[in-house]
Image (tube, rainbow, N blue to C red):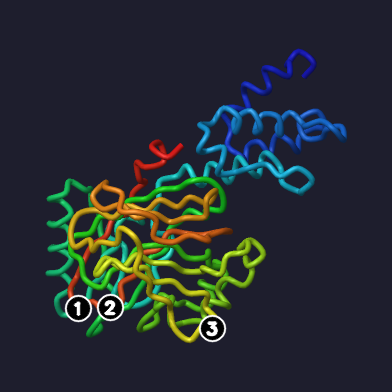
Amino acid sequence: MKTLTDDAVLHIASFMDTADMLNVALTCRRFGSAATDDLSLMERGAHQLIESAPTHEKNWVPYKKGTSTTWIGLYHELLKLRAPPSFSSILGSGINYVNKKYHVYASLREQYQQQQLQQAKWLLRRRQYPLTKHSIAPSSSTVSCVAIGNHIMSHGVHSVKFTMTRVEKISFGIIRPFDEYWVNMNDVSCKDSFNPFESWSDMIDATSSRRKNWGNSNVHCCLYETYPGSCQWTDWETTSQTIDDWCGMEHALEGDVGLLLDLDEGTLSVYKNGRRLGIMKDGLSGEYCWLMSIQGASNSTAVQIKRGYLVSNRV
């Protein structure tokens, strides 16, 4: 091992994921241990990979000196945020995946399942989106469901774009991250309905393990309502959600809805077909995930989530 220079090890580390880095760090003192004021080779490798990232990505995972944060841990978080946006959880009735986790389909009547699925596939093929499967959830007179994104965002600037085949009672925004153990134990996907503005006791239980990461903001769920374009938000402690008008407010009855979450400034901005409408909500801090919510719809719709192209225009 003496012939393997530090530079050679760091070059090899640049091709590793974080699991490989941790495994290598466990092999010997040289790779995994360091003096008090220095970094191990694997920590140095993760540090270099973060420092070589674009500025907006580095801002996603700021290093906090004096904490237990490691560079390998930060690089792991960066890799998760680099992954394409998807819907990691779908909760409530009448919703299922169409194409892995990048499309969801909200359906109503069980007797029309196959017909509605074919319609959704046809609509999405018209937009040139690849499809694979899927089945449709149980029937209901109206849909009450949500789909939660895979990214947990706590710093920097993030953007996303939602594309719909039909607009009815649909909203897009952000929500505090759920505890995966709570979701699995409560099997909320089988509930008749799921509304983040009404299920306060569920919301408190589902997010309790992560509350230390919320910062000072009392905005725990915030949604852009596609019609009439208002802002809905809640702190999960009041008797009802707050509905606000905002400067630049417009409805979005067709096309794409883009959101830009700026956690450096604490704001959430809305875009309609690529055109910026304005800042819908401020005073945001802590961790959030992307959210799609359908409450009370009586028609079927398919929704796709993609990364927005707004970050490069912001930083």
Q: Which mark is residue 298?
A: 1
Residue under label 3, please give it.
201
Q: What type is the residue that disc 3 sits on?
A: Ser
Name the amino acid type tagged 2: Val
Q: Where 118 sits versus 27, above or below?
A: below
**Label 2 belongs to which residue?**
143
Mark earlier in primary sequence (2, 3): 2
Q: Secondary structure at mark 2?
A: strand
- Give the mark, 1 or 3, whose residue is nearer the N terminus: 3
Q: Position of residue 257 (x, y in %)?
A: 28, 55
Q: Is residue 242 left or right of residue 200?
A: left
Q: Is residue 274 placed above or below 302 in the rendered structure?
A: above
Residue neighbourhood size for the residue with mark 1, other residues' Cα within 10 Å, grouped as few (<14), some (14–19), many (≥20): some
Residue sitting at x 67%, y 17%: 8
Q: Residue at x 28, y 69 (%)?
A: 170
* Callout 1–callout 2 Cβ contact below 8 Å: yes
